[in-house]
Amino acid sequence: MLGIFDQDGLDVQDIVYFGLYALQHRGQESAGIAVSNGNEIIYHKGMGLVTDVFDDQTMASLSGGKAAIGHIRYTTSGDRLYANAQPLVTKYKKGSMALTHNGRLSNAEALRSELEETGTIFQTNLDIEVIANLIARSIDLGLEDALKKMISMIQGAYALLFMTEDKLVAIRDPLGIRPLALGRLGNSYVIASETCSFDTIGADYIRDVKPGELIIIDKDGLTSIQTPIPLSSALCIFEFVYIARTDSTIDGISVYMARKDAGARLAAEHPAEADLVVGVPDSGTTAALGYAEASGIPFGEGFIKNRYVGRTFIKANQRLREQGVRVKLNALRRIVKGKRIVVIDDSIVRGTTSKKIVEMLRLAGAKEVHMRISSPPVRFYCPYGIDIETSDQLIGHSYKVDEICKIIGADSLGYLSQEGLLKTVEGSGCDFCRGCFSGNYPTDVKNEKE
Ligand code: AMP
């Protein structure tokens, strides 16, 4: 998600459009932009990629704004429905608000039931609708206090961007689980999930929004309010493994450097006798470079990726997921034939991709296939916004490493250790959530979805 409060007469809708374009890797289900002209909020949203949802006509209909927020959605909670596309634009007694949320609340269901008990009617399954209702209920306290009260009631992972007719608000959860960064474009502040979008729109990165920080931006400037936070933070370490774009920096850590270092550490932890190191594009490429450099085994392009296919994991069923891998990737026969290959990917979730990757390499004539994963086994579900609702969907939950190696058909399999992964993000001063690897979560979480 990305938002801007304009001070320079910019076309805010265009800036948000290009910013969302740079964030498309974070979600492909739906896209939306809301714009405020100071008096009212207008919006457009729809299912699909940014380019599917917006055309010249819809973009023209959004022009003339002073502030704008946009969102691309990766389904975490709620169904894949138009009603669940964001921003959620809603009216309350002081006017209108548009809201977007990245992450997932761990107490959304309890709060929703409490609100329903007192007569609130919900139109979506979104956590953000719970948040909108909590803000509206205490708005007589004034916006700042209503927001603080809402923050004291919600738990879990959230980066929020919120807009009224004349204010842009950003909030990062007290543990800083999901990233959120502040930048500047000329005299205008911008807020985004990842810094790579600042580069695309020509903005300068100022700093990350702090855990528990509430930022309110209006025509008079920026106000920062620090709400109570626990002693240590819990930034999602999976952002560095897979979620974030390689050219982003989160809480002072370069995603690229972390991924490359993960590859180098993987080479030390799980060496292999091989002729060539290849990465599974794009998510395994940087770690593969690190592995090759550290091991002295040459790096090569083992796969060619069809650039026009979205992330396969997102597809709703297993048949489509398997087909998706083949549509997306093809092994380069000329490069891999007759060779002992080390193939690097960032993670194994269900095991679909790795199995296909090994099969493709063998069909292309590879003599041996040594799979190396630049993160530990994903063994537990994520309550904070990754679309894995039960641990039993994960191959790492049900099987040991040697069993997974057999299932995917590799000659050997090695995962980076948790200690190794933590070293790749050392020095930032923040702590990390590693719940998907360890099963220990930084907040109380409800039981897994049945
Ligand atoms: P799988 O095929 O289910 O084992 O998924 C592993 C592949 O999906 C790897 O190539 C990862 O790059 C990618 N991946 C890992 N985590 C996620 C996620 N949360 N959402 C989408 N793709 C993912």
Image (spheres, rainbow, N blue to C red):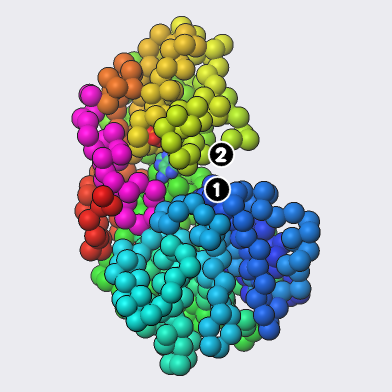
Q: Is the C-beta separation of discs 1 and 2 under 8 Å?
A: yes
Q: Residue at the spot x=52%, y=19% of the render? A: 331
Specify the segment rendered in magenta.
Answer: 378-403
Q: Amino acid at mark 2?
A: Gly
Callout 1: few (<14), some (14-19), or many (20+) C-alpha neighbours within 10 Å? some
**Prevailing secondary structure of the magenta residues:** loop
Taking 113 as reference, is 257 above or below it? above
Residue 30 in view of the camera: yes
Taking 185 as reference, is 225 above or below it? below
Q: Residue at the spot x=22%, y=56% of the render? A: 447
Q: Residue at the spot x=46%, y=32% of the render? A: 321
Taking 394 as reference, is 181 above or below it? below
Residue nearest the observer in this picture, 233 or 42: 42
- Quarter-of-image position of residue 341: top left
> In the drawing, does residue 419 fall left or right of residue 96?
left
Is residue 399 on the magenta stretch? yes
- Locate residue 196, reporting x and y percent: 57, 53
Callout 2: few (<14), some (14-19), or many (20+) C-alpha neighbours within 10 Å? some
Q: Which mark is residue 28?
A: 1
Mark 2 lies within 8 Å of ligand 1 (Cβ measured) = no
Dot 2: what SS? loop
Mark 1 lies within 8 Å of ligand 1 (Cβ measured) = no
Is residue 396 on the magenta stretch? yes
Dot 1: what SS? loop
Residue that extends furthest to the top in the rendered view of this protein: 338
Residue placed under numbered mark 2 in the picture: 310
